[in-house]
Amino acid sequence: MSESTQPARGTRDFLPDDIRRRQHVIAVIRDVYERYGFEPLETPAFENIETLLGKYGEEGNKLIFKILKRGEHEHTGAADLALRYDLTVPLARVVAQYQNALPRFFKRYQIQPVWRADRPARGRFREFYQCDLDAIGSTSAIVEAEILAAVSDILLRLGFDDFSIRVNHRLILSGLLNVAGIPAALHNDALVALDKLDKIGRDGVAREFAERGVSGDAVSKCLGFFEVPDGELPAATLDRLDAIVGHGDGSVENLRQIVALADGTSAAGRVRIDLSLARGLSYYTGAIMEITVAQLAGSLGGGGRYDNLVGMFLGREVPACGFSLGLERIIVVMTERQMFPPAVAGSAVDIMVTLWNENARADAVRLAADLRRGGLRVDVYPDADKLGKQFKYAGSRGVPFVAIVGDDERARGEVAVKDMRSGGQTAVPRADAAAFVRDRVRDGKATTERTEHTEPGTLEPRT
């Protein structure tokens, strides 16, 4: 019996078209992050296990991929390392480690894979990329507003027009739980259950509350707080919250500032207060955020303020706020909705050099080298097959142009360039062939950009 060739469950192989889609999305994310002043950072794939344990709450700890001790300690079955669960805790470790080398306000982005021992599902994998941006060193609401603007810019550039930004505040949640009569010792359990409200519904959350020891009256009162009237504007929700939990801790006013500041950015009109938003990770301390799109269970990304996390490593509180875009989910939705421009799904080759006969091999390689020096992506057909077969191969790969140098072209110092899209063929002086093709490749890309990426709300076309 042959061995299975399937990748491990919850992981995937990425073929060339997959890679091009991923590179397209990552390029947009990286460009926007850098426009907002965030700098790149990378950290190791695995951390000391004590670095990760205890940072994500009870549910998170169960999903950490542990690495067993090796060599002479292998027999113990103990773990001393673990694969990254997210990019936030490694960032906190870096800030503590390099505190004297980093600027007062440190803004970083990080695009790397993480691993979770989760149950795979549509758009959810055990190995996946996160695209994080975080700002360290300030408690200002400007930080949250800038983060929301950045992720809004990204989604608009990618072509999303039906996303909304859900925001809440951990202190508001604590206040609502207190008013409902839920003991402080059960708050973390209650938040874990509330975080599943959009997945398991009100009845499912009520059952989880009961299983975690929350009484029936408290459950009913608590869940009643999260029923926001249809069409209620953020300002009205915040006024209602003021009447319920008061404003002594500043949480309602903090959300009010974030909403007001976001109104001056691309996030305007997309922010809504969602009191059921809890975000299960235990390290959040202030405003929390998620981005959702229509007809998608779960979110395209989320984040929030975590002013205590760096302090676990440093011994003092350091203000911090961040957001993580889910690359995998974005790509799944864009693929299903056919949102990728034709240029992304097109060929990785601008022109293919055909092989006239076995005696022309050296000349074909020289021509390919000349075309590459002219800035083109060039493939060389390796066998002296009939031209029809070579054209068919180029067509199957979506190659837009084919170069032909037969005996007559070689004698005249020319190259016959065949446009595989139109079927037309043009004889070009060999010295001008690269420029001839380059101009037409560039014109084709520019046309694609103009037709695919100038919808209202996007940034300028990419070149």
Image: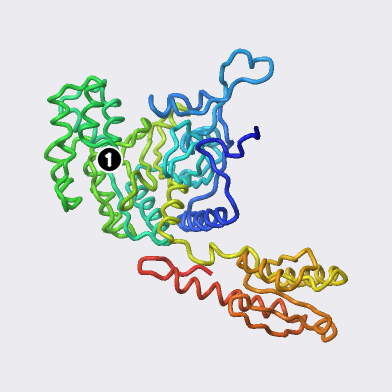
The residue most toward the front is 1
Residue drawn at the location 63% of the way across and 13% of the way down: 75
Label 1 neighbour load within 10 Å: few <14, some 14-19, many 20+: some
> Which quarter of the rendered picture does the N terminus lie within?
top right
Locate residue 194: give its quadrant: top left
Quick check: 367 left or right of 448? right
At label 1, the amino acid type is Asp
The residue identified by callout 1 is: 198
The residue most toward the top is 76
> Which quarter of the rendered picture does the C terminus lie within?
bottom right
How many numbered discs?
A: 1
Residue drawn at the location 39% of the way across and 42% of the way down: 321
Front residue of this view, candidates 83 and 121: 121
Front residue of this view, candidates 60 and 132: 60
Quick check: 353 left or right of 13? right
Quick check: 213 left or right of 326? left
User: Is 184 rendered above or below residue 410?
Assistant: above
Q: Secondary structure at mark 1?
A: helix
On the image, the x and y values in percent for residue 199 come to 29, 38
Image color mode: rainbow
On the image, the x and y values in percent for residue 78 come to 56, 16
Residue drawn at the location 64% of the way across and 15% of the way down: 73
On the image, the x and y values in percent for residue 227 come to 16, 41
User: Is 26 rendered above or below residue 298?
Assistant: below
Residue drawn at the location 47% of the way across and 61% of the way down: 340
Front residue of this view, candidates 157 and 93: 157
Locate residue 265: give its quadrant: bottom left
On the image, the x and y values in percent for residue 122 come to 42, 43
User: Is 182 rendered above or below residue 135?
Assistant: above
